[in-house]
Image (cartoon, grey):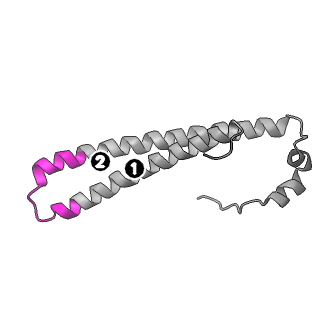
Amino acid sequence: MHRYYPPVTTAEREKRHPAEARGTASPGAGGAARLRRRAKCRELLQATREAALSRQREYEALLAQLSASEGDTPDWPFIQITIRAGIHHSRSTAAWADESLAALQAEESGRGTP
């Protein structure tokens, strides 16, 4: 089960961590923890991307296989629609992961989001 954590406003962040907000915080445990969280986030995004691309390949292979054998059955249009939905979902998940990884890279480089 996932927990919902409401977004933290800039004012709340400044109140909790004034030295970080001013840019005067020394790198320490907080910075190391942030780096670990970013690395874990990057790792999860990369795993999500790879899983989505793997599913996409599976759906495409299934579609090709069934097109040859089931193309003339009355339910074929519905089967095809369902498989194509999986292909599109997999593509969009991989694209989201790519976009998110790029945003992390841009933020780490100090450029903000792409």
Q: Are marks 1 and 2 in contact (CB under 8 Å)?
A: yes
Q: Which residues are magenta?
A: 62-79
Q: Amino acid at mark 1?
A: Ser
Rendered image quadrant of residue 51: top left
Would you name the residue on which mark 2 appears? 59
In percent of width and height, residue 44 lies at 56, 42
The circle on residue 52 is: none
Whichever of labels 1 and 2 marks the residue nearer the N terminus, that label is: 2
Disc 1: CA contacts within 10 A as few (<14), some (14-19) or many (>=20)? many
Magenta stretch contains residue 55: no
In percent of width and height, residue 41 lies at 62, 42
Left or right of 112 in this view: 90: left
Would you name the residue on which mark 1 appears? 90
Q: Nearer the viewer, residue 90 or 101?
A: 101
Quadrant (top left, top right, bottom left, bottom right) of the C terminus: top right
Magenta stretch contains residue 65: yes
